[in-house]
Amino acid sequence: MIDLQASAALEDARSSGAYVKRDLTIVRGTGAILYDDADNRYIDLVGGQGSANLGHAHPAILAALEHQMRDLISCPELFHNPVRAQYQDALCRAANMARVFLCNSGTEANEGALKIARLTTGRTNIVATMRGFHGRTMGALAATWEKTYRQPFEPLMPGVRHVPYNNIDKLAEAVDESTAAVLLEVVQGEGGVHPAQAGYLAAARRLCDERGALLILDEVQTGFGRTGYLFAHEADDVQPDILCLAKSIAGGVPMGAVLMSERIGALPPSAHGSTFGGSPLACAAALAALDVYQNTDLIPRARRLGEAVLAHLRANLPPMAREVRGRGLMIGVELRGKVAPVLRALQARGVLALPAGATVLRLLPPLVIEEADLWTAMAAVIDVLNNETSPLRAEA
């Protein structure tokens, strides 16, 4: 039998140190429920940091993986593969895009998008937004706003300018003949769960068309039903030139995608590459996941539940909360103090949640969450924030 206490100590000793771990060892999960090493039950509002839209151990994903593992796990894009071909076609049709480059993560997708934008336009500069988060590799990191992420690694990729989100006038001032692309999230996740205001993305689309820049939408976190649409930009009736996807694309299996419009066309040979990108195993999982998203009621259900949760939280806004924001089942609660003690108090009550910066409580429940569990978790959130003895009171 594994000594789990010793295992945690070993992990602390051998892991990179880049992650601040919580005092919790998760050993298994099903649906939207996780269990620790003492078999305690937790309602999961972390949702794999957005990668578990279909929850844990989804039967369609398990079946697809088991079947594909018996045939072929790895096959680089040097060769044709029928599972990859089927998925590429299905994903492009679902997103109304012409072509797709498959990779392994969201930061890789954004990195690829930046390269493709420069290659397509012959321009070098990128306009991104304040509070935006696009990843931690050198190009994606240059487009990320948070200075504590960027400064230790500067100088980064030059030519990136940040403007206020949801401010089309400032965006218009920044986009010129040197701009290869405008890079936007439909809902800023890591930056505090700030949705695009009505008309903002459409105005950005028009601006890019007028000035010859590409519009890149980063839907790494908002894609695949999270906001109550298959892709969040559908609610704004805007079509990007490049669409970046990852996280829940393959039901929890690592995968990313850069989707390209007809304007981009085919990339030149060797313009980009990925050893594991588009593996048959990942494609089989992604194909199964896409089928679930498209042929069940999970996405309209996420929209309905999200609207109900947002309304409930706003109607019962605790004194320690400034604002509730979100779309679908992507919810942020702006606090008057630090979020860390709230996360600890929720964990003690069997609810796991995320921060989005120092003062925002971020809730990303799997779309498969049982309604009873969702409302139990919301009651815990309200109770913790209302608790007069909450550690948050001392830090407010």
Image (cartoon, helix red, strand yellow):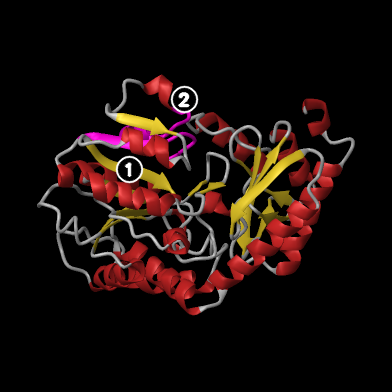
Tell me which amino acid carries mark 2. Lys
Is 122 situated left or right of 346 in this image?
left
Tell me which amino acid carries mark 1. Val
Q: Which residue is more in the foreground, 214 or 103?
A: 214
Q: Residue at the location (42% across, 61% down)?
A: 249
What residue is pinned by disc 2?
147
Q: Residue at the location (34% across, 65% down)?
A: 283
Q: Quadrant of residue 12?
A: top right
What SS does tag 2 mark? helix
Q: In this view, does 105 lie above or below 322?
A: below
Residue 144: horizontal and vertical position, in percent?
41, 34
Q: In this view, does 299 lie above or below 394?
A: below
Q: In this view, does 355 lie above or below 32?
A: above
First along the sequence among labels 2 and 1: 2
Mark 1, Cα crowd under 10 Å, few <14 / some 14-19 / many 20+, is many
Give, as a single range, the part of the protein colored magenta: 124-149
What residue is pinned by disc 1?
182
Is 215 situated left or right of 115 in this image?
right
Q: Which residue is more in the foreground, 285 or 325?
A: 325
Residue 133 covered by magenta stretch: yes
